[in-house]
Image (tube, rainbow, N blue to C red):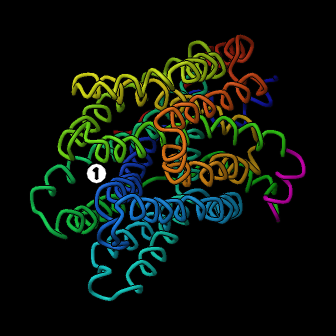
C-alpha cells in the first residue's frame, strides 16, 4: 500500500461537506430501505392473502416470498446501470434518480388493486412494481456509499460510511412502526397506508439530496481524463476476484438477514409463537438498537481494520443458527426479542458497518462504483429468494432446515473474509496518520 494509492480515497482530512454528504446519503438510504424492506414485511403478513389467495396459507406465503425475490433479482441490473452511470457521469445523478424511481414505485404499491378486485392482473402489477423497486434499490447503494466514502477523512471512512449504513435500520424501524400503527386499521388499509405514506419521505429526501455536492474522487478522475468507457467490462476483467469475494461477504449479511428477520416474521406468525403486533414490536426494538450498532461497528473498523470485524461476526453466525431457533421456539416473548436483536445487531449490523468502507477500498476509483455495486447487488439474488427457499426447507426438515441455512450463509461469509485482503491494516493506518499530520484540514462549513 502506498500514499499514492491512499490518495484515491479522497482528501486526507475529508472535504468540508463530509458530514453533510454522509447525512444526505443516509437519509436516502432510510427512505429506500423503508420502501424496499416494507415490502418484505407486507409480503410476510399480508400479500399472501391480498394477491395470492387460496385454501392453503403456506401456498400464499410462498407466492408472496417469490414476488419479494423478484425485486432482489432485479437489483444486480440496477447495480450495473447505477454503477455504470456513477463511473461515467458521477455519483450524485444516480442518487437523485434512484430515489425518484423508488418513491414512485412504492407509492404505486399502495394503489394496487387486489386479487379479489381484478384477478390475475393484481399479482402481475405487484411483480412489475417490485421489479422497478429492485432496479432503483440496486442503483442506490453504490452512489450513496461512495459519496460518503469519498468525502470522508481517511482515518474515519468506517465512521462516515457507517452513518449511511445506519440508514437501513432507520428505514426498517420507520417501516415497522408504520406497520405497527396500520395493523389496527384493518382490511386493506393495514398494508396500503405504509406504502402511500412513503411519498412524504421521498419529498424530504429529494430536497436534502439535491444539495449534496459531487464526489471529489470522481471529479479528480474526470479532470485527469480517466473516465472509463465501459466500467463493467474493465472491472470484470481486472477485478473479478474481488467481485466474487464481495458477493460472498455480502451473502452472509443480506441472506442471513433474510432468514433471521424476513423469514422469521412469517415463522413466528404461522407457528403461533407470536402475533403480528408482538413480531413488529420485536423488529422495532431490534432496528432501533441496530441504528447505533451499525455506526459503532463502522467506527470499530477504523480502529482494528475491516477484516477482523467480519471474521469474528461471521464465525459467530455459523454457531448461532440452531440456538437462534431454539430460543424463539420457547415462545417466550423476551427470548424472541433477544434473538432478533442479536441476529440483527450482531450478525447483520456488524457486517453492514464493515462493508461501507471495505467494499469501495477493494476497487480502483475509476471503476469503483461499478465494482462495489456488482459485488453488493449480485448477492441480492440469493438473499431475495432465501425466504422462499427457507419456507421449503421448513416443510422438508422443520426448523432445523432454516437454522442450518443461516449457519451456511455465515460460513460463506467467513470463507470470503478469510480470502479477502485487508484494506485498512496497521500499515494503512500508519500511512494515513503520517499524511494527516502533514496536511492541513479543510475548513468545515456550517
Q: What stretch is highlighted in magenta?
A: 230-239
- Identify the residue shown where x is 39% and y is 55%: 40
Q: What percent of the width, then of the height, locates residue 297?
A: 48, 22
Q: Tell me the residue at 17%/44% (across/down).
A: 277
Residue 101 lies in the magenta stretch: no
Q: Identify the residue at horizontal 84%, vertical 40% (top origin).
A: 241
Magenta stretch: dominant secondary structure: helix
Q: Quadrant of the C terminus?
A: top left
- Which residue in the rendered view is the most extreme toward the right? 237
Nearest to the observer: residue 270 or residue 374 = 270
Q: In this orientation, does residue 53 appear?
A: yes
Residue 342: x and y in percent read: 39, 23
Mark 1 lies on a secondary structure that is: helix
Depth check, front residue: 292 or 72: 72
Q: Mark 1 points at which residue?
A: 175
Residue 399 appears left or right of 142: left
Q: Is residue 216 above or below residue 1?
A: below
Amino acid at each position: 500500500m502506498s500514499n499514492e494509492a491512499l490518495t484515491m480515497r479522497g482528501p486526507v482530512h475529508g472535504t468540508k461537506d463530509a458530514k453533510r454528504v454522509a447525512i444526505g446519503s443516509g437519509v436516502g438510504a432510510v427512505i429506500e430501505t423503508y420502501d424496499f424492506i416494507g415490502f418484505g414485511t407486507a409480503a410476510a403478513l399480508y400479500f399472501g392473502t391480498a394477491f395470492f389467495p387460496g385454501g392453503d396459507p403456506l401456498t400464499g406465503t410462498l407466492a408472496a416470498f417469490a414476488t419479494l425475490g423478484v425485486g432482489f433479482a432485479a437489483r444486480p441490473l440496477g447495480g450495473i446501470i447505477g454503477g455504470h452511470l456513477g463511473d461515467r457521469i458521477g455519483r450524485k445523478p444516480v442518487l437523485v434518480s434512484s430515489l425518484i424511481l423508488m418513491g414512485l414505485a412504492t407509492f404505486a404499491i399502495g394503489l394496487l388493486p387486489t386479487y379479489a378486485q381484478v384477478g390475475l392482473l393484481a399479482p402481475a402489477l405487484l411483480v412489475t412494481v417490485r421489479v422497478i423497486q429492485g432496479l432503483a434499490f440496486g442503483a442506490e447503494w453504490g452512489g450513496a456509499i461512495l459519496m460518503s466514502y469519498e468525502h470522508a477523512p481517511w482515518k474515519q471512512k468506517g465512521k462516515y460510511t457507517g452513518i449511511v449504513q445506519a440508514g437501513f435500520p432507520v428505514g426498517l424501524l420507520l417501516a415497522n412502526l408504520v406497520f405497527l400503527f396500520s395493523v389496527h386499521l384493518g382490511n386493506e388499509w393495514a398494508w396500503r397506508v405504509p406504502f402511500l405514506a412513503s411519498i412524504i419521505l421521498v419529498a424530504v429526501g429529494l430536497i436534502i439530496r439535491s444539495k449534496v455536492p459531487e464526489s471529489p474522487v470522481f471529479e479528480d478522475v474526470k479532470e485527469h481524463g480517466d473516465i472509463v468507457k465501459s466500467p463493467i467490462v474493465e472491472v470484470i476483467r481486472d477485478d473479478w476476484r474481488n467481485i466474487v469475494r464481495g458477493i460472498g461477504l455480502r451473502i452472509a449479511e443480506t441472506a442471513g438477514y433474510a432468514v433471521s428477520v424476513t423469514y422469521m416474521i412469517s415463522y413466528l406468525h404461522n407457528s403461533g409463537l407470536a402475533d403480528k403486533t408482538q413480531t413488529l414490536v420485536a423488529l422495532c426494538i431490534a432496528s432501533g438498537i441496530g441504528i447505533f450498532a451499525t455506526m459503532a461497528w463502522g467506527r470499530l473498523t477504523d480502529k482494528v481494520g475491516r477484516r477482523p470485524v467480519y471474521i469474528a461476526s461471521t464465525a459467530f453466525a455459523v454457531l448461532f443458527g440452531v440456538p437462534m431457533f431454539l430460543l424463539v421456539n420457547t415462545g417466550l416473548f423476551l427470548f424472541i426479542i433477544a434473538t432478533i436483536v442479536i441476529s440483527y445487531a450482531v450478525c447483520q449490523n456488524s457486517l453492514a458497518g464493515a462493508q461501507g468502507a471495505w467494499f469501495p477500498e477493494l476497487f480502483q476509483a475509476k471503476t469503483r462504483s461499478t465494482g462495489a455495486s456488482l459485488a453488493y447487488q449480485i448477492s441480492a439474488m440469493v438473499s431475495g429468494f432465501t425466504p422462499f427457499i427457507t419456507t421449503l426447507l421448513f416443510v422438508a426438515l422443520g426448523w432445523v432446515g432454516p437454522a442450518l441455512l443461516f449457519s451456511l450463509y455465515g460460513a460463506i461469509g467467513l470463507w470470503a473474509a478469510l480470502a479477502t485482503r485487508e484494506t485498512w491494516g496497521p500499515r494503512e493506518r500508519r500511512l494515513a496518520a503520517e499524511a494527516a499530520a502533514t496536511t492541513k484540514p479543510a475548513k468545515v462549513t456550517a
